[in-house]
Image (cartoon, rainbow, N blue to C red):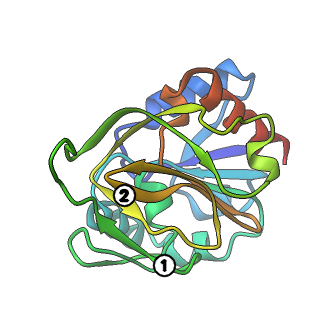
Amino acid sequence: MRLVLVDAGGANIGSVRCALQRLGVDPVLSADVDTIQAADRVILPGVSTAATVMGRLHALGLIDVLRGLRQPLLGVCVGMQLLFEHSEEDDTPCFGLLPGRVRRIPAGEGIRVPHMGWNQLQLRRADPLLDGFADGEHAYFVHSYAADLTPDCIAGTTHGHAFAAAVRRGNVMGAQFHPERSSAAGARLLARFLAL
């Protein structure tokens, strides 16, 4: 299997790569158009800001390439947020592969931002990406912005209010949580992505 990690400059590339290697897959880190288009699976990781990652992808000429992929595409953290139409973070236009907006998580009494740590997943509809997941299973989050709950949301979580934790529309998938840091649940999500 040819799996490409898009070199979008995110800080979690190394940990995502290690998580995939534990599953027996050695991904290629690349920003090359031909390499990405020839992949069987593509992962867009990201620990950065929406504007920073979109700016890098624009500079690399990868916006239309990623928009046009027909093979499975998984966005992780900021990578998932970029799948939507727009992010409030630096007022950033995104890929528009999924309808909806990404908004700053509102702080409040007992609600710290960034949302950092383990939180429960609330399954919203059945999907092969989450086969084997139980409602209430824990995953690890680190983020200050989150996507609205939309019909493409297959799992949500709540931190002050509910928002998307995992999404899927056809070949386009995303996890707001970090599968590479989410123990058995994260490994299961990556394994399901590889098996699709």
Compare residues 139 and 137 and report the one nearer the observer.
137
Horizontal and vertical percent for residue 83? 52, 68
**Identity of the residue drawn at 34% across and 63% down:** 56
In the figure, residue 72 lies in which quadrant?
Answer: bottom right
Q: In the rendered view, does 120 fall on the left or right side of 117?
A: right
90 w.r.t. 29: above or below: below
Horizontal and vertical percent for residue 91? 24, 78
- Identify the element where label 1 is drawn: loop
Q: In the rendered view, does 153 fall on the left or right side of 86?
A: right
Horizontal and vertical percent for residue 148? 45, 69
**Identity of the residue drawn at 22% across and 60% down:** 106
116 w.r.t. 84: above or below: above
Going by the numbered disc 2, the residue's amino acid type is His
- Identify the element where label 2 is drawn: strand
Find disc 1 in the rendering and name its residue.
100
Q: In the rendered view, does 51 fall on the left or right side of 127?
A: left
**Residue 119 appears in the figure:** yes
30 w.r.t. 72: above or below: above
Find disc 2 in the rendering and name its residue.
161
Going by the numbered disc 1, the residue's amino acid type is Gly
